[in-house]
Image (cartoon, rainbow, N blue to C red):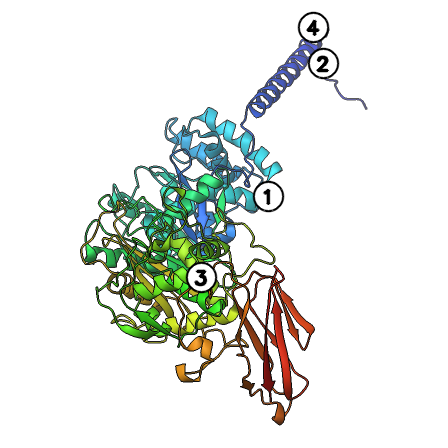
Amino acid sequence: MIGPQKPRPSPRWRRWLAGGTLAVAALGLAGGLYAWQAIGEIAANLPPTPDIETLPVSTSVVDRDGQLLRAFTTDGRWRLPVTVDEVDRHLIDMLIAYEDQRFEEHHGIDWNSMVRAAGQFVGAGGRIVSGGSTLTMQVARLIEAERTRSMGAKVRQIIHADMLERELSKEQILTLYLSLAPYGGNIEGIRAASLAYFGKEPTRLTTAEAALLVALPQSPEARRPDRDPKAAEAGRNMVLDRLVGQGVIAAEEAEAAKKEPIPTARREFPMLAAHMAEKAVKARPNAREISLTVDRRLQGALEKLGATRATRLGPKVSVAIVVADQATGDILASVGSAGFLSEQSNGFVDMTQALRSPGSTLKPMIYGLAFELGLAHPESLIEDRPTAFNRYVPVNFDGFSRGTVTIRQALTESLNVPAVVVLDAVGTARLVARLRRAYANPVLPDDTAPGLAVGLGGVGVTLRDLVSIYASIARGGTPVRLHDGVSLDTPSDTDPAPVLDPSAAWYVTNILRDVPPPLNGSPGRIAYKTGTSYGYRDAWAVGYDGKTVIGVWVGRPDGAPVPGLAGITAAAPILFESFDRLSAQTAPFRPAPPGVIVASNTDLPEPLKRFRHPNDSMVARDAPPQIAFPGDGVDVDLGLANGDGRPLTVKVRNGVPPFTFFANGAPFARTAFARQNNWKPDGPGYVTLSVVDAKGRSDLVRVFVE
């Protein structure tokens, strides 16, 4: 049975319904197309996603272990490079729990939070109560530098957040937040904030510190601890309370954190090795991070030492210190002044590289050359008496003469007259040439020829020069180029010419270990030498053990005299205290090389018992070679009767290298620079030893070996 049928719509109704449906569909499609077009336009106008590796950050100068020495602002802002791994994990957990609990799950927008925020917006009469922003959306706002919280800006951030999630990993997004988040004033990023408010890197933070750093980016100016500590404390405590409610931290932990004081001032950013850092940035202006060879702990300790010592000497006095590793040439510390920001002592001047008179600090090189040339031995006798060299008449520092002394005594007491006498023998040109072999750059007045005054400080050198020279002596005569990782990062020559031969360098070290220490030093601990320039303008002390060489300069950067300033009283105590601040104990010195003669004056070969002043026939500048050891006609006990025995060392003075050495007419050695060589006899008996120099001149001796 067919029931009553529903009336059919009239054709007009059908047309209206169909038309309305189409109209609604058309309007919906048009609205969708318009919205899609609007989204496309917004997306097209968004700023490019920053590359974390090239994000503009403060240039950081770090030490050999990556620890911050000094940072420089970028466009007036402190924004230091940072990675998630360099931030305390506790802070990361607190940040995500407080700001974006579903950070690891959503794709840039947490719609639950957005719905909640929309409800609060309606309930508050169109006023935004909470933004519902995810960390990704906050990163979008930071990239755009958009501070407004309007609905239009929110839509833009939603679109931008979606794009960021498509392009970046969660870790990269978090890294951008930690790098760009504002913390008040010109501080951006978690690392700059931790340094500014707590004076430490964000790798290890207390719960209270982490909570404050979570709270600050929400209201960076209103909650600035240095301007409104109470507002900062309220923001921190609000974070702590919410985290307790979420079960992220215990109530007891939060209460303990609330008792920690809020920092009330910004701390200064690190400014260690300030002079080196400035030069490094000038050398590499586009670098994000520059690594130096400096040791941060040692640098900080020596900067404090220099400042303390300078304060005792006067407000205009400065101190410079250079520490270098002998093996590598790495500069481990470089204190350019007693205080980089000191106006009275011209702290901006880097006194490690300022040309000054070295005083007596070059005397070890003078005697080292005499040892190498076979003119002297540490126990050789020399006259300390008034001596004139044309119009140049050197006198000792105290004005007194000692008469006959040993070379050892002359150097340990830093007597001037014997040093000039020996320099006249070895030649000033040779001395300057050897200083240059040590990678020093001595500067003579008006580029004149070097005179005898060079030996007592009549030449310009830098503290780095002296450290380089003494490093060569400490290394047995082999030079090493000092470098800081940037400005002097030039590799040393593969086979550099020696500064001294090994025996001569060992003799010098052996004498310098006998130099009496200052009141705060221990004898024999280091080999060192002091110096005082003319007019009490510069005080020096340079010393070394078996591993490290340290140089100290004290004076006024403007070159004015400081009455009573002397190396032994002003610089030497700082030198010994600098060695105290090394992390390792004093390293042992190099052992004596083959050929060293350890003997008293009476047991020395006749030519070495007394230093003979140069004259036209004996030590003229171009005299023929002479075998200084062994002497002609002597018996040499090499222990051949008891076994293999020791090699015989043959030493040559005068002549022009290279030398060719012969035993019984057969050549056994030829060296480019050395003036001594070892020969191993087959057994006891007479042997004729001879040497021929580069000009074909020769000398010979006949000895008996047993």
Q: Tell me where residue 299 sits by quadrant.
A: bottom left
C-beta proximity under 8 Å, tags 1 and 2? no
- Calculate the distance from the C-alpha at mark 1 to the C-alpha at mark 3: 83 Å
Specify the farthest residue to the bottom: 642
Of the 4 image quadrants, the one containing the C terminus is bottom right
| SS state under label 1 | loop
| SS state under label 4 | helix
What's the residue at 33%, 60% (across, down)?
360
C-beta proximity under 8 Å, tags 4 and 1? no
Return the disc, 4 or 1, that comes first in the chain's sequence: 4
Given the image, on which type of amino acid does mark 1 rest? Ser
> Is 621 located above or below residue 580 in the figure?
above
Q: Name the foreground residue: 291 vs 481.
A: 481
- Calculate the distance from the C-alpha at mark 3 to the C-alpha at mark 2: 143 Å
Q: Tell me where residue 407 sits by quadrant.
A: bottom left
- The circle on residue 12 is 4
Q: Nearer the viewer, mark 3 or mark 4?
A: 3
Return the disc, 2 or 4, that comes first in the chain's sequence: 2
- The circle on residue 7 is 2
| SS state under label 2 | loop
Give the x, y percent position of residue 171.
55, 46
What's the residue at 23%, 53% (across, down)?
535
> Is 440 located above or below residue 592 in the figure?
above
Give the x, y percent position of residue 117.
44, 35
Q: Name the foreground residue: 390 vs 161.
A: 390
